[in-house]
Image (cartoon, grey):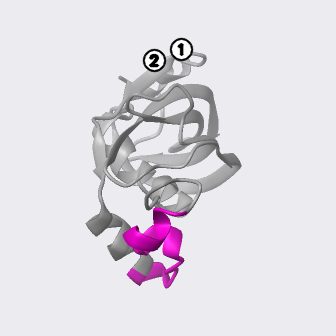
Amino acid sequence: MNREELKGKVGEVVGTSKWFVIDQARIDRFADVTEDWQYIHVDPEKAKASPFGTTIAHGFLTLSMLSAMVYDGGPEVDGVVMGVNYGFDKVRFVSPVKEGARVRAVFTMMDVTDKGPNEIQTTMGVSVEIEGQEKPALVAEWLGRRYFAEAAA
């Protein structure tokens, strides 16, 4: 879709990603990268005694999966040569993601603002669903900037 069509999608779901498995290997790799080795993430035996009964993904791991999820199921806009993460207005970790769960993101366009002839800012509502659960893993308002090779006509 072009940028004017994207503006017409405000208030609508604009994409849903595939399901991603959050297994212990992924959780362990994230723990190593971030140096967050809290037992509820990396020690399956000790985590059995936690309120979760198993290891859980780091909230920031779930948040970081948004990049893969938007590449997979987010809206594609004609003429975009680069997109950047501009930040978040809101992030809430609603439910823990237990080891072995599958998650996916649903993207709702909340706002599209021209920032220049070759740039727009989008605000997307994001809900990361956990397969088989009613409550999402996280909800967020995600800001992005998209840059075009040519100015809008």
Toward the viewer: 33 or 153?
33
Toward the viewer: 89 or 152?
89
Disc count in the image? Answer: 2
The image shows residue 89 at horizontal and vertical percentages of 72, 47
Residue 3 placement, left or right of 16: right
**141 vs 14: above or below:** below
Q: What residue lies at 34% left-to-right and 51% top-to-bottom?
A: 68
Q: Tell me the tag on residue 5.
A: 2
- Specify the segment rendered in magenta: 32-49
Q: Which secondary structure type mostly characterizes the magenta part of the structure?
A: helix
The image shows residue 64 at horizontal and vertical percentages of 46, 59
Q: Tell me the tag on residue 8.
A: 1
Q: Quick one: label 2, few (<14), some, or many (20+) residues within 10 Å?
A: few
Badge 1 vs badge 2, beta-carbon distance below 8 Å: yes
Q: What residue lies at 40% left-to-right and 71% top-to-bottom?
A: 45
**5 vs 145: above or below:** above
Say which quarter of the image contains residue 74.
top left
Residue 6 placement, left or right of 139: left
Toward the viewer: 26 or 50?
50
What amino acid is found at the position of numbered circle 2 in the picture? Glu
Q: Tell me the tag on residue 76.
A: none
